[in-house]
């Protein structure tokens, strides 16, 4: 813009304005290119995350079916009689003991 004062003729002013316009257009084009690249990266990332979430949905659906069947079998066993209840309590206590032993051993192994 300081070059405008040095310009002698209207043609020189137009030339200076054209040069500045081209420089600003190039600067704007580089910014647009960066924004386009960023938008494409975001799109790619969103598609990857959607695929990951879809696979998690199918995994959770299969686990839900598995747990539903297990709960039905567990309920049937609990309702079937007194001997099964004793067995069920013994198995539950045994699993709790195994869980606490494993958690203790894993905590000791980390330190």
Image: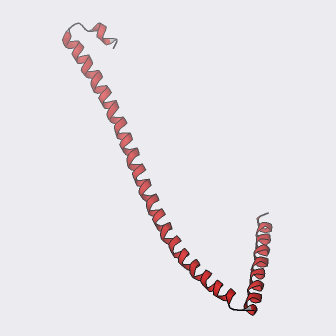
The colour style of the image is secondary structure
Q: Indicate the position of residue 95 as horizontal and vertical percent values.
A: 74, 80
Residue 104, image x and y in percent? 80, 70
Which residue is at a point 31% across and 26% down the rendered structure image?
Answer: 23
As rendered, which of 6 and 33 lies closer to the eye?
Answer: 33
Instruction: Please identify the residue farthest to the left as the structure is shown.
Output: 11
Judged left or right of residue 81, residue 20 is left
Above or below for 26 versus 20: below
Residue at horizontal 26 percent and vertical 17 percent from the top: 16
**Residue 106 drawn at (x, y percent):** 76, 69
Q: Residue 75 in the image: x percent, y percent?
A: 65, 84
Left or right: where does residue 20 sit relative to residue 103? Answer: left
Q: Residue at x 35, y 35 (%)?
A: 30
In the foreground, 54 or 41: 54
Residue 49 vertical placement versus 88 (above, below): above
Task: Residue at 60% x, 83% y: name it.
Answer: 72
Placement of 79 over or under 104, stated as above or below: below
* Quadrant into which the N terminus falls: top left
Q: Nearer the viewer, residue 102 or 68?
A: 68
Quadrant where the C terminus is found in the figure:
bottom right
Residue in front for this viewpoint, 85 or 45: 85
- Total marks shown come to 0
């Amino acid at each position: 813009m300081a070059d405008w004062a040095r310009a002698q003729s209207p043609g020189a002013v137009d030339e200076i304005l054209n040069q500045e316009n081209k420089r600003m257009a190039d600067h704007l084009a580089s910014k647009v290119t960066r924004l386009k690249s960023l938008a494409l990266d975001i799109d790619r990332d969103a598609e990857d995350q959607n695929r990951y979430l879809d696979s998690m949905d199918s995994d959770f659906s299969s686990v839900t079916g598995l747990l539903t069947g297990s709960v039905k079998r567990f309920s049937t066993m609990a309702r079937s009689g007194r001997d099964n209840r004793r067995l069920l309590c013994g198995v539950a206590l045994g699993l709790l003991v195994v869980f606490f032993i494993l958690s203790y051993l894993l905590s000791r192994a980390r330190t």
